[in-house]
Image (cartoon, coloured by chain):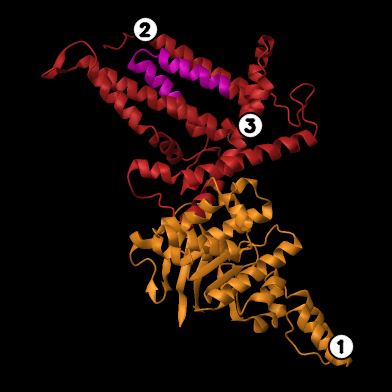
Chain colours: A orange, B red
């Protein structure tokens, strides 16, 4: 069953002024429950606008967004509840930390939901574990943490609300290579354990290829493709024409195929490529 | 949205007024403000208001923008106007309990309203046609003589430039943080005033932290480029007075003389 549906949504910034800018134009798609969706597009393609529409921070000028089949703007007064169900981690989320302790900061979301104390406690600890935050850090001030730990704490703050859909806007931007890998696999294992829906915005095709089931491609405020990861990355030419590219390893394997070497198409990760090449050598 | 507030009101252009030297614009503004208050009867007030309107026409900026800037303090203008209605002497036109409306009162109300409106309009001319950088640069040059009294004019001007430069940045940052906290269920739109103020804490603290971070970064960057105050510092663009400034001066002098003459040869306003 589809959990999140966009029906012909459009959004215009500064409508009616001289700075009018169409950010989204007639975008429709359906995200199935339990899916891991990657969202790619070059800067200014409408990704950020789209994710803000999905959790009710912006209201579409046209079209509807359905969560579990119900229009999220049906009762504008109840929009906060939608935001609890569609959790959103912004870019550089560490800049939103504000409480005295990491524990209190992670508990901010669940507290706003009005949950009882014991449940908040349980959720905070579970969320901290998912992002790999050591328990002794919970009593520290968030401003004493290192950059990577701050990022984890901020992501835990959204995970602690236990959203049905989790949206992450470039969660690995600015982290070191190891930090990126660890964080991505933590998000992946969170998705596997909780069986919820995840929407990941990223500029790293390698990350997306490794982790996403389906990919939504945006260009100039329009949906260009929405298909399985293998299918999207087999259309390298089209991706390049809108300023994106395929993962490097996919490109290498494509070139090998053009050279007449019998490797399968749509190889997405280095591990897959390694296996295929080793199979050829045996 | 916070972003909709227009603070940096500069509207780029190539009109006569835009091309005036920023220093003369500041001095003209001061002079106009003085003469708006020197004007003592309707005729002289009309003269200075007409002069201001002519200047506004010359800026080639749509009058709508000026009205917008007026909207902000419309309340103040109306309030002063209405309060002035009850003060004044002369023939009593209407009386009820302790409220008396006199000819002087009506005169006062109209006069004060026009005065403040003109004041706001002519002040907008300066901020609309001068970029913040030119403005602070001009202020620094005009205040240079104060260095004699050990006032650090350059440092003050630099602080002002930096403050102006960072207003849009901080506004954008506020927007981002507000969205992030709203996504975690912050409720800033409902509840009592006390609750709303409390709901701002999650926005203000990150904003504070990030402004200090930015200040630190900026200080570091300035030090890396060997900035050490105004001493021996040269400018890429040095402003020059031109014929335009002289014409402006002539026009203004004629107007100011007119105001004084009107004051002298026509009776003062009945108050």
Q: Which of B221 and B48 is in front in this view?
A: B221
Left-right relation of A194 to B47: right
Q: Tell me the chain of label 3.
A: B
Residue B56 screen position, x and y as percent: 48, 32
Q: How crowded is mark 2: few (under 14 residues within 10 Å), some or many (20 or more)?
A: few
Q: Which of B161 and A115 is in front in this view?
A: A115
Residue at 30% across / 12% down in the picture?
B269
Residue linked to disc 1: A259
Magenta: main secondary structure equals: helix
Left-right relation of B67 to B105: right
Q: Residues within 10 Å of mark 1 (few under 14, many from 20)?
A: few
Residue B20 visible: no
Left-right relation of B221 to B7: right
Q: Distance between the residues labelled 2 and 3?
A: 46 Å
Residue linked to disc 2: B265
Could you tell me which secondary element the residue under label 1 belongs to? loop
**Labels 1 and 2 in the same subunit:** no
Is the residue A262 above or below the residue B51 in the image? Answer: below
Residue linked to disc 3: B161
Q: Distance between the residues labelled 1 and 2?
A: 99 Å
Q: Tell me the chain of label 1.
A: A
Q: Nearer the viewer, mark 1 or mark 2?
A: 1
Q: Tell me the chain of label 2.
A: B
């Amino acid at each position: 069953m589809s959990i999140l549906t966009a029906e012909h949504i459009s959004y215009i910034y500064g409508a009616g002024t001289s700075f009018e800018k169409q950010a989204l134009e007639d975008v429709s798609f359906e995200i199935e429950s339990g899916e891991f969706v990657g969202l790619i597009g070059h800067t200014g393609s409408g990704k950020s606008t789209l994710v803000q529409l999905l959790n009710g921070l912006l209201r579409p000028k046209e079209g509807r967004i359905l969560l579990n089949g119900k229009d999220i703007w049906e009762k504008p007064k109840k929009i906060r509840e939608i935001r609890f169900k569609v959790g959103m981690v912004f870019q550089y989320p560490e800049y939103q930390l504000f409480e005295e302790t990491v524990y209190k900061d992670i508990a901010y979301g669940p507290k706003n939901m009005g949950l009882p104390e014991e449940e908040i406690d349980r959720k905070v600890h579970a969320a901290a574990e998912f992002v790999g935050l050591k328990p002794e850090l919970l009593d520290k001030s968030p401003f004493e943490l290192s950059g990577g730990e701050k990022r984890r704490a901020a992501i835990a703050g959204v995970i602690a609300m236990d959203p049905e859909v989790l949206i992450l806007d470039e969660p690995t931007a600015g982290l070191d290579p190891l930090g990126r890998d660890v964080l991505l696999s933590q998000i992946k294992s969170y998705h596997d354990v909780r069986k919820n829906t995840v929407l990941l915005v990223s500029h790293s095709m390698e990350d997306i290829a490794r982790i996403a089931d389906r990919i939504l491609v945006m260009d100039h405020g329009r949906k260009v493709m929405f298909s399985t990861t293998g299918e999207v990355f087999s259309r390298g030419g089209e991706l390049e024409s809108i300023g994106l590219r395929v993962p490097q390893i996919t490109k290498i394997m494509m070139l090998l195929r053009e050279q007449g070497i019998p490797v399968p198409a749509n190889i997405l990760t280095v591990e897959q490529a390694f296996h295929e090449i080793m199979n050829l050598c045996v | 949205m916070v972003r909709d507030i227009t603070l940096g009101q500069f509207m780029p252009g190539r009109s006569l007024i835009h091309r005036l030297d920023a220093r003369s614009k500041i001095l003209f503004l001061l002079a106009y403000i003085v003469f708006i208050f020197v004007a003592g009867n309707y005729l002289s007030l009309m003269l200075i208001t007409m002069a201001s309107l002519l200047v506004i026409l010359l800026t080639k900026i749509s009058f709508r923008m000026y009205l917008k800037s007026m909207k902000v303090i419309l309340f103040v203008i109306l309030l002063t106007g209405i309060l002035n209605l009850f003060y004044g002497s002369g023939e009593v036109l209407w009386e009820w309990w302790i409220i008396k409306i006199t000819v002087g009162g009506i005169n006062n109300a109209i006069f004060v309203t026009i005065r403040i409106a003109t004041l706001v309009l002519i002040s907008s001319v300066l901020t609309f046609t001068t970029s913040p950088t030119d403005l602070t640069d001009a202020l620094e040059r005009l205040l240079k003589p104060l260095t004699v009294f050990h006032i650090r004019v350059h440092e003050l001007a630099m602080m002002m430039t930096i403050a102006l430069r960072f207003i849009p940045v901080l506004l954008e940052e506020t927007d981002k943080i507000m969205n992030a906290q709203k996504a975690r269920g912050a409720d800033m739109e409902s509840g009592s005033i006390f609750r709303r103020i409390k709901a701002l804490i999650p926005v203000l603290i990150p904003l504070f932290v990030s402004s200090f971070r930015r200040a630190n970064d900026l200080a570091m960057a300035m030090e890396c480029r060997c900035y050490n105050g105004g001493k021996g510092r040269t400018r890429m663009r040095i402003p020059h007075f031109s014929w335009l400034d002289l014409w402006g001066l002539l026009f203004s002098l004629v107007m100011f003389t007119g105001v004084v003459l009107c004051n002298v040869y026509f009776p003062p306003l009945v108050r």
